Every structure is written in C-alpha cells, then in structure tokens.
Image (tube, rainbow, N blue to C red):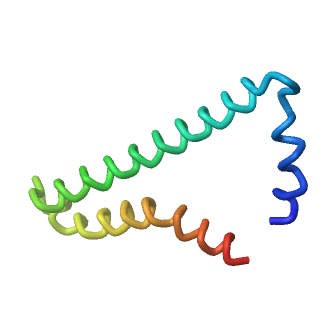
Amino acid sequence: MNVVIALAPRLRSAGGQDSRITTLLAVTAFTVSTALTLSVAGGLMAFLDRAEHPVGAVQQQNGGFYVLLAATALVLPWTAGLVVHAL
C-alpha cells in the first residue's frame, strides 16, 4: 500500500498539465475489468442453464461441478482483492 501512496503524486501528474492520458488509462482499465467480469458472469449463467437442462449423461453428471468452477472464477478476484487489502 505504501508503494501506491508513493506513486500517486507521480501518476497524478503523469500527463503534465494535460491529464487526458491519465484519464484515458483509468477509463480503459475500468472498461477492460468490467468487460471481463461481465464475460465471466455470463459464463456462470450459461453453466447454470446447462446444469438445469442437461442434454446428455455427461452434462447431467458434471453440470454441478462446472457451476462450482464458474462461481469460483467469478468470486476469486474479489476474494483475492480482500486478502491483499487486508495486508
């Protein structure tokens, strides 16, 4: 956390008098992270639907496991963020 605090003034003035580059980087980071989160959430919803309506024996047998993996993929970054923030 001390590294972030030390770099904050430099990042704030990274664009000089014109802060468009810094703003563009922040908007890009937010856009990419939102797109990835929505993609993983969409995958979880697809696996939930497939587990509710299996087509074959393999899907019927493994449907719950895939839902568990997809839910873990959705929650894992949030949990890792909490752990890092607690340190």
| Image: 48 above or below 80 | above
| Image: 4 above or below 81 | above
| Image: 44 above or below 22 | below
Q: At 43% from the left edge and 60% from the top edge, which residue is drawn?
A: 74
Q: Position of residue 70 (x, y in %)?
A: 37, 60
Q: At 9% from the left edge and 57% from the top edge, which residue is drawn?
A: 53
63 left or right, relative to 53: right
Which corner quadrant holds the N terminus?
Answer: bottom right
Q: Position of residue 2 (x, y in %)?
A: 86, 65
In the orientation shown, which residue stands out farthest toward the bottom? 86
Number of numbered discs on residues: 0
Query: Of residues 4 and 53, which is closer to you in this image?
Result: 4
13 left or right, relative to 39: right
Q: At 63% from the left edge and 75% from the top edge, which residue is drawn?
A: 83
| Image: 23 above or below 10 | above
Q: Quadrant of residue 86?
A: bottom right
Which corner quadrant holds the C terminus?
Answer: bottom right
Q: At 39% from the left edge and 45% from the top edge, which residue is drawn?
A: 38
Query: Of residues 85 and 69, which is closer to you in this image?
Result: 85
Q: Quadrant of residue 33?
A: top right
Q: Position of residue 76 (x, y in %)?
A: 51, 66
